[in-house]
Image (spheres, grey):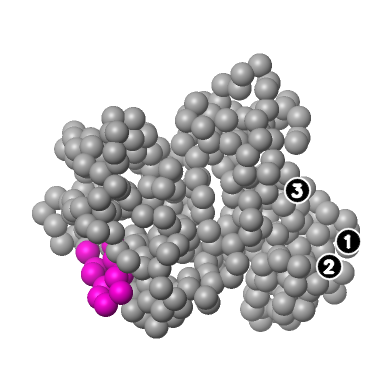
Amino acid sequence: MSARVEVVSGSHLVASLDGVVVVVAHRDSRPLTAESDAVAVLDKLLDLVAEASSRETRRTGRTFARLVSTWLMAREDEENVEFGVLTPGTRGLAVFLHGRVTAILEGEQRCEVMHGRDAGFSVDRVVGPAPARAAAVFVDDGEPRATLPPPGVFALRDGRVPGSGAVMWREDAPDTPVGGVGKNASHTIPAGVVVHGYDCARGHLNDPRASLCAACGIRMEPMAGVLTEGIRPPLGVLLLDDGTSYVLDSDLVIGREPERSDQVRRGAQAIRIPDTSGGMSRVHAEIRLAGWDVLVMDRGSANGTHIRPPGRPDWVRAAPGQPTVLKPDSQLLLGGRVFTFNSPIGPSHSREDRPRM
């Protein structure tokens, strides 16, 4: 199943590892941090995905199902762990659901919905052949989803980001799914940007400053500082104050009417943000990806772009037209809206003494 993985915004956790999609519920009322239980659960699930992959000559999802069931039964609080995993295999798609999560499998003529909470323990199925159009998994927040969102949200290669779920769109699927929204509605996913970095032991390319792999979490052990070349993974997400997240896999232009920008016509993604304060300009600011860095640049907005570095109480106004590097956990104030920059290369995951590439 050749698929493009797209993330749906939300406050839970979504990860992709070698084509396997994992969604973990974050039920804590506190913000998601590296110490959150959901992060530990995701780390364990990704380890089990990697272990299952190393044991199977042909991926079926059955080895992962056995490993994760054993792990769950050994936990005293297994009812508090909620997640969904989609594993594309050689003969179909393996679906594993535990707790309040939902999977949606969309074919050419019908759509099947599975709920993890309907099972006595977990949903463990192999669907063959794989769905002709798309497969998705979502954390249930209130009423479970019954239909897929339209294509055109943000693509995720290997890595992890906040989100409520993920959709695996078949690359060879016909243009009009069951819901009537064609794949042609999606924006063009930009070609990968080639960068230099360090590979972890599992082959994931990382920022040279990282001490832990952003995709699978294992410790980085670069070989005598030798850099490798590869496609840059997403550099994190911008989290809006209403919980909407924007994956940083391409340049962004933010404002009330960002499509007016020349940068959007050249391929940057337009992020239209409503702002009742009246302080948001039509084309307010740009987010640029340069190497492994995320930069913000004010576009001469009337009220300015303000940055609050991590751990600082004060806002600093950015100079118009001058790109500024954002540190992980920095906040941006654009008009009356606040964004937070979340990155897998946070303070506990970085080596500040390493050179910027």
Q: Are marks 2 and 1 in contact (CB under 8 Å)?
A: yes
- The quadrant holding residue 164 is bottom left
The residue labelled by disc 3 is: 290
Q: Residue at x 62, y 30 (%)?
A: 198
What secondary structure do most residues of the magenta stretch adopt?
A: strand
Q: Which residues are magenta?
A: 103-114
Which of discs 3 and 2 lies nearer the camera? The answer is 3
Which of discs 1 and 3 lies nearer the camera? The answer is 3
Whether residue 112 appears in magenta in the rendering, the answer is yes
Ranked by sequence position, the earlier of labels 3 and 2 is 3
Whether residue 233 appears in magenta in the rendering, the answer is no
Return the x and y of residue 231 as percentages of the image width and height: 62, 44
Q: Residue at x 33, y 79 (%)?
A: 178
Return the x and y of residue 331 as percentages of the image width and height: 68, 55
| Up-down relation of residue 351 to residue 102 (above or below) | above
The residue labelled by disc 1 is: 321
Ranked by sequence position, the earlier of labels 2 and 1 is 2
Q: Residue at x 77, y 79 (%)?
A: 260
Q: Quadrant of the C terminus?
A: top right
Q: CA distance from mark 2 to mark 1?
A: 6 Å
Amino acid beneath label 3: Ala
Q: Which mark is residue 299?
A: 2
At label 2, counting other C-alpha atoms closer than 10 Å, the crowd grade (few under 14, some 14-19, many 20 or more) is many
| Up-down relation of residue 190 to residue 43 (above or below) | below
Q: Are marks 3 and 2 in contact (CB under 8 Å)?
A: no
Amino acid beneath label 1: Gly
What is the secondary structure assignment of the residue under circle 2?
loop
| Up-down relation of residue 256 to residue 163 (above or below) | below
